[in-house]
Image (spheres, helix red, strand yellow):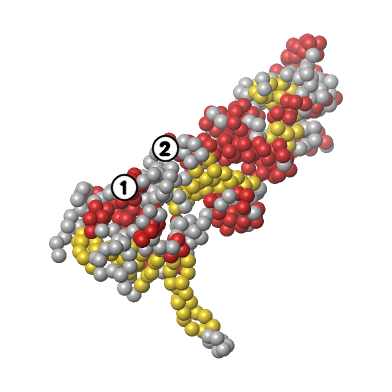
Amino acid sequence: MEKRQFQTESKKLLDMMINSIYTHKEIFLRELISNASDAIDKRYFRSLTEPETGLNRDEYEISISADEASRKLVISDNGCGMTADELENNLGTIAKSGSLDFKSENSADSVDIIGQFGVGFYSAFMVAEKVTVVSKVYGADKAYKWESEGVDGYTLEECEKDAVGTEITLYIKPDSEEEDYCEFLEPYSIQRLVKKYSDYIHYPIRMDFEVNKPVEGKEGETEKVTERRTLNSITPLWRKPAAEISEKEYNNFYTSKFMDYEPPIRVMHYKQEGTVEYTALLYIPSHAPFDYYSKNYEKGLQLYSSGVMVMDKCSEVLPDYFSFVKGLIDSSDISLNISRETLQQDHQLRTISRAVEKKIKSELSKMMETDREKYEKFFKAFGSQLKFGVYSDYGTHKELLQDLIMFTSSNDMKYTTLKEYVSRMPEEQKSIYYACGDAPEKALRLPQAGAVKAKGYELLLLSEDVDEFTLQTLMSYEDKKFVNVATDELDLASEEETKKLNDENESGKELLDFIKEKVGGLHAVKYSAALGDHPAALSSEGGMTIEMARVLSKMPDADSQLSASLVLELNAAHPAVEKIKELYSADKELCAKHCRILANCARVMSGLEIEDPEEFGNLICELLA
């Protein structure tokens, strides 16, 4: 029998397709099942106008059988079959797609064909050392067999076949140290791959399983019987009308599909029509996965093309700030490249991504307005990610996200949005004030926070590392500037108070310079009217705040010189400061010790570590003795 050569491409191209195009070898089964589904689609479609070619809808099926002893895997269908010419053209010509030709000859809306590129079939050679295709079309007397061992070419000859359709036999490669090919002959492995990639093929995918069953009338005895099983679900949940799906069905699908032990907090099920049509089933989890805030977490939605899973986690359709969303996108419009693992048309994907982004934003806004308790539960789990979204990419997405983020309010120690805060601002208040601490309660205890509260102004209490970076990125909200109370931007004094402070700082310059020298590490020392009944507090000058410096110093490879320009603020009327004034005239050495104790107390209040705890302890003990 004469061996024929592949017509349009070189052996090198076929070798590349077999060894390089597909990342995972298991993809071959998805490709062959998709081809079988296409063949049945064609026969069914033609039966609408040519009834003699058809079967009843429930008679169509894809069958799989495996023989571990002979290492043969067989995938067969009762679809349209192929003539000798079609075998020659579709399998003998690399990148020739019979499905694509068929679709181009018929209305795009009238038939749904999965395969559009003629290379998926060749993925079989990743796992098989020889592939045989036997096919027969309806009404033909003869069948034809196409056989190939890969790059060396193929043979084509007449053969016998009773039923209409196509049967593909893969002679699975021997196992090696690098690859374990026998898994593709194991029924339960095949079942797993069908569930993973082809669960929603329109036609039943069936396979025989040998199982042990009790022998009737003989207690304790079992016998091996053959049980034929349907491996796929056939009808995807997301293709049913939303009105026909119960909450329990949505939740069961989510917990089983995405391996979560709790039902989701929100479900989004919708169909998008327009430039790109797709169906989406999206879930917002009720809690964060254990690895969500780690580098090991993989975001992404499952991507389907007409019910065939193309990608398990397509990160391109989900922005990082909404990476907590789980679910899937199913679109027949998505154009895929020959690997079906990398999208060919970025434009289509970007269109879907933008629409998904808007939908998630809309759903979160709706949840905030209509079910605040549920939204706050969501925000406790994923609020940090939204804040990172504001801060990342140089604030590109801040307007999209700014109304979704919340902070603790000093009014009631509950979450508030920026819009809600601004709506409560007194008319004379010009800025949005915030304080930072390890916890909201600690932030509220800052001396400067007390001064803002005394003025009747509300504070946002920031306790997460990302919080201040988020507000610094926003810069303002509704033309109200964000002001950290522990910076030189805080200005609550009246003109009269400001004049008095200026006079005190000028007259006390000698003492203030003395304190700066003896304490060390300070940018400045000054009197302040924003400390309430506290003797001292730390603030900062310039763009680097105390909180920002603290956060940045914890990062790997942090610059050891990175620090805020610290300012020690003193309450001139406090007894502890009055004592320092007296000691400055009477005993400068003792005065210096008091100054260092007071400065360290201010560090503790600001959430900073004491640089020399031993000295601090000794000074306290010395003064107590």
Local packing at callout 1 (Cα closer than 10 Å; few below 14, some 14-19, many 20+) is few
Q: Mark 2 is on which residue type?
A: Asp
Local packing at callout 2 (Cα closer than 10 Å; few below 14, some 14-19, many 20+) is some
* Residue at 61% over, 33% down: 401
* Residue at 51% over, 57% down: 235
| Chain-order first, disc 1 or disc 2 | 1
- Residue 50 lies, in percent from the top left, at 36, 56
The image shows residue 598, relative to residue 556, as above or below, that is: above
- What is the spatial separation of the Cα atoms under label 1 and label 2, in whole angstroms? 24 Å
The image shows residue 156, relative to residue 617, as above or below, that is: below
Q: Mark 1 is on which residue type?
A: Asp
Quarter containing the N terminus: bottom left
Q: Is residue 22 left or right of residue 250?
A: left
Q: Nearer the viewer, residue 576 or 197?
A: 197
Residue 580 seen by the camera: no
Query: Residue 532 got which mark?
Result: none
Q: Nearer the viewer, mark 1 or mark 2?
A: 1
* Residue at 30% over, 49% down: 97
* Residue at 64% over, 28% down: 471
Quarter containing the C terminus: top right
Quarter of the image for residue 496 reads top right
Q: Secondary structure at mark 2?
A: helix
Residue 165 seen by the camera: yes
- Residue 537 lies, in percent from the top left, at 74, 27
Number of numbered tags placed on the structure image: 2
Q: Is residue 505 left or right of residue 149?
A: right
Residue to which mark 1 is pinned: 101
Q: Nearer the viewer, residue 399 or 250?
A: 250
Residue to which mark 2 is pinned: 346
The image shows residue 503, relative to residue 398, as above or below, that is: above
